[in-house]
Amino acid sequence: MDEPHVYDASQTNPILALTYRHPMQSANLSAKSFRNIGLIGRPDKSSVVETLSLIHDHLLHLGLHPVFDQETAALVPDNNTQSVSRSLLGEVVDLVIVVGGDGSLLHAARALVRHNTPVIGVNRGRLGFLTDIKPSEVIFKLDQVLQGHFQLDRRFLLEMEVRSKGETIYDAIALNDVVLHSGRSVHMIDFELNIDGQYVYRQHSDGLIVSTPTGSTAYALSGGGPILHPGMDAIALVPMHPHTLSSRPIVVSGHSEIKLTIRENRVLPMVSADGQNSISLNVGDTVHIRKHPFKLNLLHPPGYDFYMACRTKLGWNQDFDSFQQQDDA
């Protein structure tokens, strides 16, 4: 896990002069710390627009300055809203509120992580591991955060490079995972795995999921991978339907350098970061994956509990809870 550290956000944003401490540690900050508040929303749900408008009006009532990213501003009926491009949003605001599902927060994270801008999520999606504020509690929970009562959760990302004949032809970052897969084909793919320069195996399978602790409750979990606590400095490698049944998920250090080399295939394998644009790979191409140098500063309201999130989102204890209800009846 990370060693305790101090993060001075004033280095990247002169408006924000906060001291951030160890992940998941509560901090008491002045309400004046958060003055300019960014707003990002999922574009295809009317309920998102309702929640964004509610938050926008509440922030104005508090004397704060809400700023939409340009895509989100187009959704809101108020023509007097301030907006900037998403790529610049992290430079001009002190906090970003994302309204949507975990996918919406993944999109925001990739744009904001370089600015060290804190992010908090309001769930208008399905599971909501990352966007953990309920819409019915949004004003109460946001007021707690704006008053400086929150838990800071620093999540690391992965960076990926695709190299062909020694030259980088594509790069991307991922909060959840980097996935090597066979695209639309039903054929297995052939690839070689090296970790920190050491040969691990050559595998025939449907692909490989390289997951952060954040992504361990997403696609990697569906593939049979382990759940990693978000505070762990580790990466999970989860084979997808390997032809050799003894090929099991493995967990390596978060500082590991992972290299995938494409071998002879009947189809062109593909690779994607957080489910974004998949690019085709040729024989001999290599995919290099390592920890990204910046971390996402994810904020939770007071009382956040990762294990409670697992119980709620993954349905743990359902049988016991139903038995308890029957006994009480």
Image (cartoon, grey):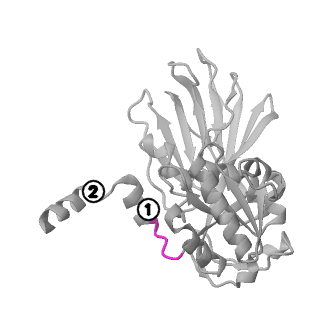
Q: Quadrant of residue 260?
A: top right
Which amino acid does the dot numbered 2 rest on? Gln
Image quadrant occupied by the N terminus: bottom right
Image quadrant occupied by the C terminus: bottom left
Which mark identifies residue 309?
A: 1
Left or right, 178 with reference to 188: right
Q: Residue at x 43, y 26 (%)?
A: 243
Observer-nearest of 288 and 305: 305
Q: What is the x, y in percent for residue 97?
A: 67, 62
* Mark 1, secondary structure of its residue: helix
Q: Is residue 53 above or below residue 29?
A: above
Which comes sooner in the sequence, label 1 or label 2? Answer: 1
Q: Is residue 325 above or below residue 124?
A: below
Q: Residues within 10 Å of mark 1 (few under 14, many from 20)?
A: some
Which mark identifies residue 318?
A: 2
Q: Is residue 300 above or below residue 78?
A: below
* Mark 2, secondary structure of its residue: helix
Observer-nearest of 135 and 167: 135
Which amino acid does the dot numbered 1 rest on? Ala
Q: Residue at x 70, y 82 (%)?
A: 31
Q: Residue at x 14, y 61 (%)?
A: 326
Q: Residues within 10 Å of mark 2 (few under 14, many from 20)?
A: few
Residue 156 is at least partly visible in this image: yes
**Which range is magenta?**
302-306
